[in-house]
Image (tube, rainbow, N blue to C red):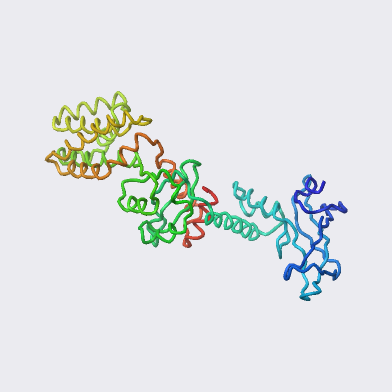
Amino acid sequence: MAPVCIGIKGYRVIGRQSNQEEMVSVELEQEPQQCRHCCSSRLVSKGRYERQARHLDTFGRASRLKIQTRRWECRDCGRSFVPETPGLRSWRRSTEPWRESIYREHHEGICATAMARMRRVGSATVGRIYAEFTGRKARERESMQCPQILGIDEHRVHRGMPFATTFCDLKNHRIFDIVPGRSERELAAFLSRLQGREKVKVVCIDLSSTYRALVRKWFPNARIVADRFHVVRVLQHHFLELARQIVPELKNHRGLLSVLRRHPSRLEERQQGRLGKLLADHPALQPLHEKMVELWDLLRLKHQTARACRHHIGRLLRLIEDLRQSTFEPLVRLAKTFHHWREALVTMWRFTRNNGITEGFHRKMKLIQRRAYGFKNFHNYRLRVIAQCG
């Protein structure tokens, strides 16, 4: 009966009074059997003790709990105590369900001013409750197991702290944690106390040598998967750099650069005409563009079997060797990059996870920063990100 009436286990309802607000009188179902300090069973009552606390609204009316208990004294140690009250922490004037409802409604978008007006509390109280629950949520990260499918990427915070590293749970689509810095020295303290590192199976990163060395050291059983978006962007960057060297007027022609960046299968009829005219006017770009598209098509493959991957590996290595034999410096640098990352490139065909989820959360983090007009304190920024994206 009691859990149905008030929503908190451990109480027995003994009375109810209705006026402008509901007043529900309850008492503990079970009195303490031993001392909280010395565990002695020789207890004597020191008199009645009463607490009142704000509770969840009942049928649109505010309600309060009047908790009636006793203060007990231990005959062995001589110390007195009040038994713990379920759902109501020490020095609180509101129950945990009521405070959690404040947190959830504020989290869903109701501003602190409107919340304070509806619940008849101060806006600072709403802020304190929200900070308390977000702090609890952040402390849970210390004992949580690391996700088995992890995405790692960096994002900018502010000028005083240029970069922070994002650890994203790609399987459950949520932020696991964010840590200031992106070097191994800055992340070592966080990674050393991270639980479940040996159970991580897949880590998706961009083509960052720092992150690759970090994953190999701290996630020994994880397979590194290169992020397809960043791989294609590196490919386009080097080929467009060479195209600007061959055709200098491309530097100031954003329309033609946009046509070269797009895959031919995604071009409209008008754009295909512009691309054809560009390649006809500059025949030196034709073989370069064909080579870029061929390599691009190979990197776009997904859901490949192990047998198909063995066939694609030989093709990838031949294309890398062709780029290495080229006389153009941008293509040689591209071949060197892809050669160093060849294992991570091959795993893209088998594992379809990518950091597109992480980049989407980065966009949401920017909105959080704008809404708060920036964060000077990284701890507050981390709490808000975990609350909104975790």
The residue most toward the bottom is: 78
Does 90 sit above or below residue 236? below
Q: Position of residue 128 (x, y in %)?
A: 62, 60
Residue nearer the viewer, 61 or 184: 184
Residue nearer the viewer, 118 or 28: 28
Residue nearer the viewer, 199 or 110: 199
Q: Position of residue 176 (x, y in %)?
A: 49, 50
Q: Which quarter of the figure has residue 285?
A: top left
Does 327 sit above or below residue 220? above
Determine whether, in the image, residue 217 is placed left or right of residue 321.
right
Does 354 sit above or below residue 176? above
Determine whether, in the image, residue 85 is placed left or right of residue 114.
right
- The residue positioned 59% from the left and 57% from the top of the image is 136
Determine whether, in the image, residue 121 is placed left or right of residue 133.
right
Determine whether, in the image, residue 388 is placed left or right of residue 47.
left
- The residue positioned 19% from the left and 45% from the top of the image is 333
Q: Position of residue 159 (x, y in %)?
A: 38, 60
Q: Position of residue 293 (x, y in %)?
A: 25, 31
